[in-house]
Image: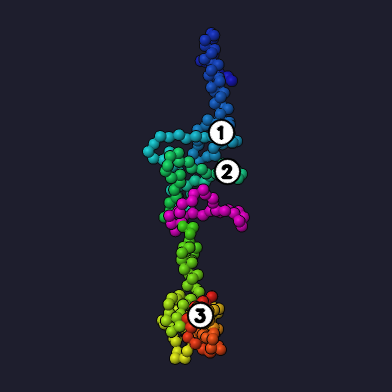
């Protein structure tokens, strides 16, 4: 390089100073060309050409955030975008490490949707975790707003049952309204249910172990079933007998 006249000095000690100046100027030209060590230019591509080959580190010691990015444009425009080309099992595009016990990330919005996760493939997972605790407000125990207990309860309610004594007294039931109608004729009972059971299957079984007989039933309407109980020793004649009734829907 050509030095101005005031740098053309002689003497062994003087040449050392000139040599150092040349190295500094030459090194600065190399840094600007590669991007390493250059100042960031707002509103420009950084580096202006080529790629930075080493990690850029920002270290701070502050009670607030080390860096902040914000976009004041209203209506459109994001705060930041990060892109990468990493393969599965390598570094993600974004990673937040909390080296103590606080949160690693937090998202906040005034909108009605917190965020969107886009993946590729019909069987792709939205995310994986090694956590086994229940997330507040995001309970995996719920399906369509129902917990496991609610789902079991709904399944049980869909299948009415009844335990009936020989005199028509209702011992226990699920989905039966009111009392059992036991007519003057022996062995005839009518049960009314709180839902339409016309497309369900009903089964009745006598619970008298000493003289069990045949039990028959038939729907009388969309919500009622008649049960006839017969004695075993009386040649199948109608007789009052205790029975259980199960309706499967």
Label at residue 210: 3
Residue 126 is left or right of residue 182, and the answer is right
- Helix, strand or loop under label 3: loop
Q: What's the distance in space between the residues labelled 3 and 1, CA to CA?
A: 90 Å
Q: Residues within 10 Å of mark 2 (few under 14, many from 20)?
A: few
Residue 230 position in % (x across, y down):
53, 86
**Above or below, 242 relative to 157:** below
- Helix, strand or loop under label 2: loop
Stretch of the chain drawn in magenta? 111-138
Q: Quadrant of residue 86?
A: top right
The residue that label 2 is drawn on is: 84
In what quadrant of the picture does the C terminus appear?
Answer: bottom right
Q: Quick one: which residue is furthest to the left in this view?
A: 63
The residue that label 1 is drawn on is: 54
| Magenta residue check for 112 | yes
Q: Residue at x 61, y 56 (%)?
A: 123
Q: Is residue 59 visible?
A: yes
In this rendered view, identify the residue nearer to me: 142 or 18: 142
Residue 108 is left or right of residue 229, and the answer is left
- Say which label, 3 or 1, has the lower sequence index: 1
Q: Residue at x 45, y 34 (%)?
A: 59
**Above or below, 12 relative to 147:** above
Q: Say whether marks 1 and 2 touch (CB < 8 Å).
A: no
Q: Nearer the viewer, mark 3 or mark 1?
A: 3
Residue 58 position in % (x across, y down):
47, 35
Residue 248 position in % (x across, y down):
54, 75
Q: Residues within 10 Å of mark 3 (few under 14, many from 20)?
A: few
């Amino acid at each position: 390089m050509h030095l101005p006249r005031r740098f053309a000095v002689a003497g062994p000690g003087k040449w050392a100073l000139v040599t150092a100046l040349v190295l500094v100027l030459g090194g600065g030209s190399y840094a600007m060309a590669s991007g390493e060590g250059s100042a960031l230019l707002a509103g420009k591509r950084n580096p202006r050409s080529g790629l930075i080959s080493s990690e850029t580190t920002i270290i701070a010691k502050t009670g607030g955030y080390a860096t902040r990015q914000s976009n004041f444009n209203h209506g459109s425009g994001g705060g930041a975008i990060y892109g990468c080309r990493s393969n599965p099992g390598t570094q993600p595009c974004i990673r937040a490490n909390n080296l103590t016990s606080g949160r690693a990330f937090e998202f906040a919005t005034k909108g009605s949707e917190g965020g969107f996760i886009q993946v590729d493939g019909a069987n792709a997972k939205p995310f994986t975790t090694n956590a086994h605790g229940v997330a507040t407000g995001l309970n995996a125990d719920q399906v369509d707003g129902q917990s496991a207990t609610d789902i079991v309860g709904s399944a049980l309610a869909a299948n009415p049952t009844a335990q009936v004594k020989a005199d028509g007294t209702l011992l226990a039931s699920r989905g039966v309204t009111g009392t059992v109608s036991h007519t003057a004729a022996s062995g005839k009972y009518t049960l009314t249910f709180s839902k339409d059971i016309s497309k369900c299957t009903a089964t009745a079984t006598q619970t008298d172990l000493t003289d069990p007989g045949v039990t028959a039933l038939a729907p009388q309407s969309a919500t009622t079933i008649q049960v006839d109980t017969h004695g075993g020793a009386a040649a199948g004649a109608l007789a009052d007998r205790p029975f259980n009734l199960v309706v499967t829907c």
